[in-house]
Image (cartoon, rainbow, N blue to C red):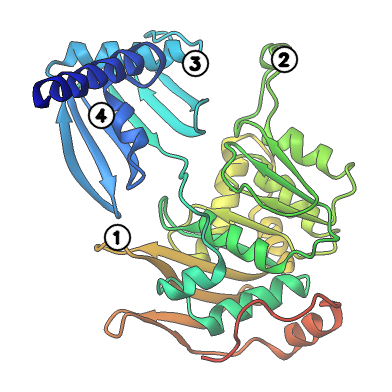
């Protein structure tokens, strides 16, 4: 009996391997199924994975040629071709929405490079969950919730993997009333907002050419400009990285407020610099002082997140953006105590704005104590 069971186990394993090779992600399939794995990286023939914020070696493909065959397989799975004429490839894994980036082996000295950021299938965390995990305090969460409910615009910043999208989603679920029509824009579907009236749009970050358009491609900038014709009560932008960022901040000057978005930034002070860099990169003739006025006139709070050496993701600071560009700290992370501490109070005029624009939305979703 034991021998038959062993053979069945082996047969099942072989069947799974064949299915993975033909239909799935090949040797990477086990890491796609492992919910503890958040990123999968292939450097040459070595596979690394990220678990709980820490990178660790996982397995070896044996040879650089095996890694090339893997890259070819991943591309074919999505109807693409792995070729030196297109050395940088970005696409979405259709089975679960994971983001895949491949650098052709002709452009690296260490062999093909594959980077996969998994779309997490775990339970989406609510704001109280993040409080319980120590990612944010009740008082800081309460400030952000009431700011967004009071029609102030909030930008979440930080490096990749710091938890920006997760916090943005939790805030949206805590704030947005059921009666509102919400439009989200992303380059990959990650927010997955469980709200009654959501239009979830997906487009590419870079501007599209006419040839791209003939194939049905659409940019996030195109989507955003069309969004303004779609009667949104609130717009939530998953992440600003390209020319859509300029259109977004421009639109904030005439919107009713309460918008949310994220950006990759090292510190909040760099927001105007980042927008100026985007404008210059994409040939938009926008002077720096105009960008500064646009930011300082539309953004009320910047929430900076970080992921520390232990892999813990948390709010590092919250600043209020003054009309003169001054960044007024409201909360700051204290490394010694490993706690987010209140260090300032929201300005009186912003408090008055929140009181005048909050409306009726029931009980606050988080406790303001603490």
Going from the N terminus, do you reach mark 1 or mark 3 first? 3
Q: Residues within 10 Å of mark 2 (few under 14, many from 20)?
A: few
Who's the residue at 60% across and 31% down the image? 206
* Label 1 secondary element: loop
Q: Are marks 1 and 3 in contact (CB under 8 Å)?
A: no
Seen from the viewer's position, the closer of residues 337 and 345 is: 337
Circle 2 is placed at which residue position?
Answer: 210
Q: Viewed as shown, does residue 67 lie left or right of 317?
A: left
Q: Estimate the x, y position of residue 241 in percent, counting from the top left.
A: 57, 43
Q: Is residue 55 above or below residue 291?
A: above
Q: Quadrant of residue 211?
A: top right
Q: Is residue 118 above or below residue 14?
A: below
Seen from the viewer's position, the closer of residues 162 and 159 is: 162
Q: Estimate the x, y position of residue 301 in percent, counting from the top left.
A: 62, 72
Going from the N terminus, do you reach mark 1 or mark 4 first? 4
Seen from the viewer's position, the closer of residues 125 and 288 is: 125
Who's the residue at 74% across and 64% down the image? 176
Q: Estimate the x, y position of residue 96 in percent, counting from the top left.
A: 49, 32
Who's the residue at 75% across and 36% down the image? 223
Circle 3 is placed at which residue position?
Answer: 78
Going from the N terminus, do you reach mark 4 or mark 3 first? 4
Instruction: Report, in whole angstroms, how far the alpha carbon at label 1 lies from the one at label 4.
Output: 20 Å
């Amino acid at each position: 009996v034991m021998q038959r069971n062993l053979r069945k186990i082996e047969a099942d394993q072989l069947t799974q391997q064949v299915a993975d090779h033909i239909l799935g992600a090949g040797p990477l399939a086990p890491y796609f199924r492992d919910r503890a794995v958040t990123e999968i990286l292939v450097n040459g023939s070595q596979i690394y994975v990220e678990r709980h914020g820490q990178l660790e070696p996982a397995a070896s493909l044996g040879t650089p040629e095996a890694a090339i065959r893997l890259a070819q397989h991943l591309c074919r799975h999505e109807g693409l071709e792995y070729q030196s004429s297109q050395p940088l490839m970005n696409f979405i894994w259709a089975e679960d929405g994971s983001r895949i980036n491949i650098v052709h082996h002709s452009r690296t000295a260490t062999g093909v490079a594959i980077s996969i950021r998994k779309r997490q299938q775990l339970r989406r965390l609510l704001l109280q969950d993040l409080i319980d995990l120590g990612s944010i305090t009740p008082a800081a969460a309460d400030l952000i919730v009431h700011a967004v409910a009071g029609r102030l615009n909030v930008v979440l910043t930080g490096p990749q993997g710091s938890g920006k999208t997760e916090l943005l989603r939790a805030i949206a679920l805590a704030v947005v009333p059921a009666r509102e029509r919400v439009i989200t824009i992303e380059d990959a579907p990650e927010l997955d907002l469980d709200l009654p009236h959501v239009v979830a749009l997906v487009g590419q970050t870079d501007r599209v050419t006419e040839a791209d358009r003939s194939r049905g491609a659409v940019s996030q900038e195109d989507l955003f400009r069309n969004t303004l014709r779609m009667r949104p009560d609130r717009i939530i932008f998953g992440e600003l990285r390209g020319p859509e960022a300029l259109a977004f901040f421009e639109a904030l000057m005439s919107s009713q407020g309460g918008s949310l978005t994220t950006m990759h930034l090292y510190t909040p002070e760099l927001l105007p610099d980042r927008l100026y860099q985007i404008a210059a990169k994409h040939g938009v003739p926008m002077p720096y002082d105009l960008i500064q006025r646009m930011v300082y006139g539309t953004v009320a709070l910047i929430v900076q997140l970080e992921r520390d050496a232990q892999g813990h993701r948390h709010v590092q600071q919250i600043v209020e953006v003054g009309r003169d560009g001054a960044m007024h700290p409201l909360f700051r992370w204290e490394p010694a105590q490993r706690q987010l501490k209140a260090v300032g109070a929201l300005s009186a005029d912003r408090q008055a704005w929140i009181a005048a624009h909050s409306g009726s939305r029931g009980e606050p979703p988080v406790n303001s104590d603490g």
